Image (cartoon, rainbow, N blue to C red):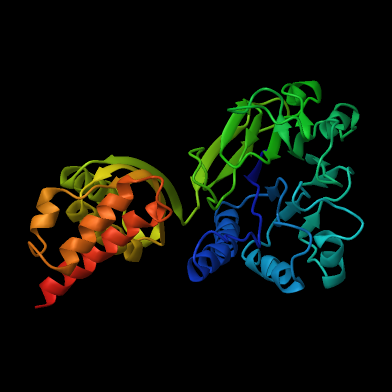
Amino acid sequence: MSFKILHTADWQIGKQFGFMTQDAGAIVRVQRLKTVEEIAKIASARRVDAVLVAGDVFENNTLADDTLRKTLQAMRYFKDGKWILLPGNHDPASAESAWTRLERIGIPEHIVAATSEEPILLGDNGLALLPAPLHRKHEVRDLTESFDSTKTPEGAIRVGLAHGSVEHVLPGEWDAKNPIASDRASLAKLDYLALGDWHGTFRANDRTWYAGTPEPDSFKENDTGNVLLVTLDGPGALPHVEKIPVGQFVWHRIEKELHGAEDIAHLTHQFSALSEPHSRHIVQTRISGVLDLASRNTLDEVLAEWTAKFHYLTAAEVNLVTTPTEDDFDRIDLSGFVRTALERLREIQKDSSNPEHEYADEAMRRLYFEHVSGEKKQ
């Protein structure tokens, strides 16, 4: 008997995005619920038997009851199968948690909070789900070890559900918290091991996958914004895994060294090349280099224009220096207060011992901008 499951994880409903301006952050936070709605619609359209959420359903255990209710409401489009929700390190199944409050609120029968290690049997016992819920944020032992000895009905497809770090497999430095053996699927005779915690879609081996967060939440380039449609044709058969994009927002990190108008034009081209609609994009730029005042004024105008077009744009200046040139001075009156002030600010900028040194760059830019803007209005 064949089964289809939709594997997702790391929703982190209620996550704050405090580094964004208030409206931009609030919209991203609400989008996470809309993405859950999209997951439910996909599950219904693909006629899956279950949706497995491999931990970190919620950002923390102190969310308001209203947020918990909204999460249940977002899942309403899929009722023909089961939702299996696993507690992760952000929302462990502690004595008082989001899970205990959900119980008091009342969970529909088709939604199962997998807060114990008890196997969950579906499809006339043809599919056996083995959960490894976290009861605290960090475990030093491998909770999936219990899968090895867990008995399931003869002939049932065995699927593990866990949240943690597969040993020495994930890109970068391995996180020893909440460890999972890299050969757990083999040791426990699992047909598929559905994992959460790593926020990108990642294949650890033929039977072990991370779905990643379905709605991107950082500038890391690790293939986020997906869910996995997993088809299990029978015990021992290799799973067929299909990646389905669901994320709304796209996050980018752009690093650029600027030394004049040509470089700024290239940065503008990079912005323009991002897919439409531009309002889907959250962009972090890191800008370095040396610019004259005219080029710096152009850069500020470009950033202001694209700040309005993108959902959010932040520009970090990393060793970006503004150095007036003779051409900059020639654009200003050959004599008079503005030119004198600008020359004085340039002297302060060059003198690192001057207590006003760190403010001179910004002051020059503002003075130049106000002067040039005033000329344009005349």
Q: Residue furthest front?
A: 353
Vertical relation: 310 (above or below) 210: below
Front-most of residues 336 and 234: 336
Any part of residue 267 in sight: yes
Residue 193 point in image, percent of width and height: 71, 34
Front-most of residues 122 and 70: 70
- Residue 113, image quadrant: bottom right
- Residue 300, image quadrant: bottom left
Front-most of residues 62 and 376: 376
Image quadrant where one finds the C terminus? bottom left
The residue positioned 21% from the left and 54% from the top of the image is: 293
The residue positioned 52% from the left and 69% from the top of the image is: 22
Front-most of residues 214 and 343: 343
Q: Is residue 260 left or right of residue 112?
A: left
Residue 282 point in image, percent of width and height: 43, 55
Q: Is residue 32 left or right of residue 328?
A: right
The residue positioned 16% from the left and 62% from the top of the image is: 339
Q: Residue furthest bottom?
A: 378
Vertical relation: 250 (above or below) 331: above
The residue positioned 37% from the left and 62% from the top of the image is: 279
Residue 354 point in image, percent of width and height: 40, 51
- Residue 125, image quadrant: top right
Q: Is residue 294 left or right of residue 223?
A: left
Any part of residue 1 in sight: no
Image quadrant where one finds the N terminus? top right
